[in-house]
Image: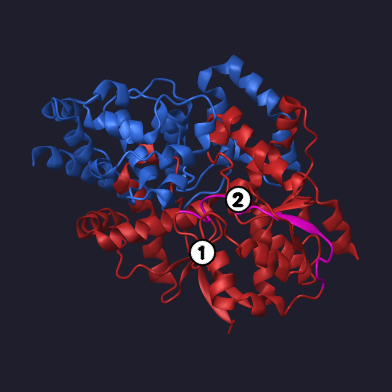
C-alpha cells in the first residue's frame, strides 16, 4: 500500500494534451517518489472556474462541484480530494463550505444530483496538492528524497492569487506567503526576494481583456528579473500559462526582452528527486528552461 | 428578459438595496460596507483605466438607489477574482463574491452593458464546460476570437499564432479538440439532467425571495 492515498481531481487544464499537461506529468513523477497514490475521481467534471459566475448562477455551479464530491465519496470512500489547480481547489472548497452551512442549498443540490443518480452523504476534505506536501508530509520529509539539489539556481516564487486567497495554506499570510520559497529552498534552490509574489496575473481576463492582464503580467515578470531570478516558479496552471505564453506579446508592445522560463514546483521537485527532463515534463515549457534541461542531463 | 424577471424587478420599485439583497448572490452583504475603500486600493485593475466605479462606490450607489448606473456599470466585470479585496475587507464583506453577484443579477435581468468582453467570456466558458462536462480549450479560444465576426477573429488568431504554435509544440494544445475529439465526461446526459434541475430550482429560489 502507498504511504498516502487521495482522490485526484486533476481539472480540465491538467489533462493529457491540455494547457497544463506538463503540470500533470511532473505531479505524477513527484508523487511516485513520495509514494503518494492518486486515483482519479471517475468521470469528474469541470468546477466552473471563477469566471463563469454570470452565466452559471449559484446552484448550477455548486451542483457541478457537488457531482465531483458524490463521485469521490461513492468510488473512493474515505479519501480526501486533492486538486492541483487553484481554481478547482477554490471552486470545490467554496462549494463545500456553502453546502455545509446552508441546509436549503444542500437540499436543492441533492435534488439536482438525484437527476444524475447521485447523492452526497459526507463531503470529503478538499486539499490542494501543496497542502498535501506541507501538511501531510512537511518540509523535512520532502527533503529526504532529494538526490540532486538545485544548487546555485535562483527562482522567483510566484504564488499568485487563488492558491493564496481566500483560503490559502494554513499558517501563511495572504500578503507574504513563504511556503513556495521554502519549497524552493527544500530542493536546494535560492528563493530571491520577490515583491510581486502574490500579485494577480489577470486570471481569465487574460482572454477577455488581454491588454489589462498583460500590463499586470509585465510587472510580475519585471520584478522577477529585478530580484535576480533566472526562472519563475508557481503552483497555479493559469498563473503559469499567463506569465509564460504572453512574454512575446508583451515584448512587442513594451519593447522588453522577457525570456524567462515559468516552472511548476512539481517540476523542480521531480528534478531534485533525480527525475529526467521527460519525467519533469520540461518539454512542456513554451519558454524552454535550458539550464534545467542541462541539469537534468547531467 | 423573461416576463417573470420583469415582474420580479418591478416589485422592488424604489428599493434597490432590497432588490440587490434578495436577488444578487451575496447581496445581503452590501449594507455591511463602511466605505473605507480598502477594496478599491487592493484591486489590481484599479491601477488601470477601465472601471466606472470602485466597489465601495458601487455599494453606496446601491444604497442611494442608483439602479441604472449600477446595473449598467462595467465595474463588476473588471473583477479578476484575485480575492485581495475579500481577504482585506475589515468588515469581512466577501467583496469578490458580491461583485460577481451584482454582475450576475444585472446580466440575468438584461440590464448589463452590451458587448462586455468578460461577460461574453463568462457565458462562453460556462456553455463550453457544461456541454460535455469538461472544457474544450480549443473551442473556447476559437469562440472568444471570433465573437466580433470572422474578419476580426482571423486578425486576432493571427496575432496569437505564435502563442498557439508554442503550446502545440509543447503538447499543451490539441488541435483535434476543434473537431470534437476532446476530453469529455461519460455521463453527459446525467450532467445535463442535473443542471436542468438546478436551473429550475435556482429560478424558484429567486422567485420565492421576491414573494417573501
The answer as to whether the residues below labels 1 and 2 share one chain is: yes
Residue A26 position within the rendered picture, expressed as x and y whole percent measured from the top left: 69, 62
The residue nearer to you, when weighing A121 against A137, is A137
Q: Which mark is residue A237?
A: 2
In terms of secondary structure, where does tag 1 sit?
loop
**Up-down relation of residue B182 to residue A280 (above or below):** above
Residue B190 visible in the shown view: no
Rendered colour, chain B: blue
Where's residue B119, x and y in %? 42, 30
Query: Disc 2: which chain?
Result: A
Q: Give the left or right position of residue A44, taking residue A137 as reference.
A: left
Q: Name the residue located 41 percent from the left edge and 29 percent from the top edge.
A: B75
Q: In the rendered image of this protein, does residue A251 appear above or below residue B169?
A: above
Q: Let me know if residue A167 appears in the view.
A: yes
Does the segment drawn in magenta span residue A149?
yes
Chain that is coloured red in the picture? A
Quarter of the N terminus of chain B within the rendering: top left
The location of residue A239, given as percent across then percent down, is 61, 47
Which residues lie in the magenta part?
A148-165
* Magenta: main secondary structure: loop
Q: Which mark is residue A169?
A: 1
Disc 2 packing (10 Å; few <14; some 14–19; many ≥20): many
Q: Residue furthest left?
A: B212
**Farthest right residue in view:** A298
Q: Would you say A114 lies left or right of B184 here?
A: left
Nearer-the-camera pick, A195 or A267? A195
The residue at the point 17 percent across, 28 percent down is B9
Q: Residues within 10 Å of mark 1 (few under 14, many from 20)?
A: many
Decide if residue B64 is on the left or right side of residue A137: left
Amino acid at each position: 500500500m502507498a504511504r498516502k492515498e487521495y482522490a485526484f481531481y486533476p481539472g480540465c487544464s491538467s489533462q493529457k494534451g491540455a494547457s497544463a499537461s506538463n503540470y500533470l506529468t511532473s505531479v505524477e513523477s513527484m508523487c511516485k517518489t513520495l509514494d503518494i497514490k492518486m486515483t482519479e475521481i471517475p468521470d469528474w467534471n469541470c468546477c466552473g472556474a471563477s469566471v463563469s459566475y454570470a452565466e452559471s448562477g449559484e446552484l448550477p455551479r455548486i451542483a457541478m462541484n457537488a457531482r465531483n464530491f458524490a463521485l469521490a465519496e461513492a468510488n473512493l470512500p474515505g479519501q480526501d480530494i486533492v486538486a492541483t489547480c487553484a481554481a478547482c481547489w477554490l471552486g470545490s472548497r467554496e462549494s463545500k463550505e456553502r453546502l455545509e452551512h446552508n441546509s436549503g442549498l444542500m437540499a436543492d443540490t441533492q435534488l439536482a444530483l438525484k437527476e444524475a443518480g447521485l447523492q452526497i452523504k459526507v463531503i470529503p476534505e478538499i486539499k490542494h496538492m501543496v497542502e498535501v506536501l506541507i501538511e501531510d508530509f512537511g518540509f523535512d520529509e520532502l527533503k529526504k528524497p532529494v538526490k540532486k539539489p538545485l544548487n546555485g539556481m535562483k527562482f522567483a516564487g510566484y504564488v499568485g492569487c487563488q492558491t493564496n486567497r481566500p483560503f490559502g495554506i494554513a499558517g501563511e499570510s495572504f500578503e507574504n506567503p513563504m511556503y513556495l520559497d521554502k519549497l524552493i529552498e527544500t530542493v536546494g534552490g535560492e528563493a530571491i526576494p520577490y515583491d510581486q509574489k502574490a500579485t494577480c496575473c489577470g486570471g481569465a481576463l487574460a482572454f477577455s481583456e488581454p491588454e489589462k492582464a498583460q500590463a499586470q503580467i509585465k510587472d510580475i515578470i519585471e520584478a522577477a528579473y529585478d530580484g535576480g531570478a533566472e526562472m519563475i516558479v508557481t503552483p497555479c496552471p493559469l498563473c503559469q500559462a499567463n506569465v509564460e505564453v504572453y512574454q512575446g506579446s508583451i515584448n512587442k508592445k513594451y519593447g522588453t526582452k522577457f525570456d524567462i522560463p515559468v516552472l511548476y514546483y512539481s517540476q523542480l521537485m521531480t528534478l531534485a528527486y533525480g527525475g529526467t527532463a521527460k519525467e519533469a515534463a520540461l518539454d512542456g515549457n513554451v519558454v524552454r528552461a535550458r539550464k534545467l534541461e542541462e541539469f537534468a542531463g547531467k | 428578459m423573461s416576463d417573470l424577471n420583469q415582474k420580479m424587478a418591478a416589485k422592488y420599485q424604489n428599493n434597490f438595496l432590497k432588490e440587490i439583497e434578495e436577488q444578487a448572490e451575496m447581496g445581503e452583504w452590501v449594507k455591511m460596507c463602511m466605505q473605507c475603500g480598502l477594496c478599491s486600493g487592493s484591486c489590481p485593475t484599479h491601477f488601470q483605466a477601465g472601471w466606472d466605479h470602485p466597489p465601495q462606490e458601487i455599494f453606496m450607489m446601491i444604497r442611494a438607489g442608483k439602479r441604472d448606473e449600477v446595473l449598467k456599470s462595467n465595474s463588476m466585470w473588471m473583477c479578476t477574482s484575485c480575492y485581495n479585496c475579500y481577504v482585506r475587507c475589515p468588515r469581512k464583506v466577501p467583496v469578490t463574491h458580491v461583485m460577481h453577484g451584482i454582475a450576475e443579477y444585472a446580466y440575468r435581468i438584461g440590464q448589463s452593458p452590451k458587448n462586455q468582453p468578460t461577460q461574453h467570456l463568462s457565458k462562453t466558458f460556462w456553455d463550453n464546460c457544461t456541454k460535455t462536462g469538461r472544457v474544450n480549450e480549443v473551442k473556447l479560444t476559437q469562440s472568444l476570437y471570433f465573437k466580433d465576426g470572422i474578419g476580426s477573429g482571423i486578425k486576432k488568431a493571427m496575432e496569437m499564432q505564435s502563442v498557439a504554435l508554442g503550446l502545440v509544440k509543447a503538447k499543451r494544445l490539441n488541435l483535434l479538440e476543434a473537431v470534437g475529439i476532446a476530453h469529455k465526461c461519460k455521463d453527459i446526459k446525467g450532467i445535463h439532467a442535473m443542471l436542468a434541475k438546478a436551473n429550475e430550482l435556482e429560478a424558484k429560489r429567486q422567485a420565492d425571495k421576491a414573494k417573501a
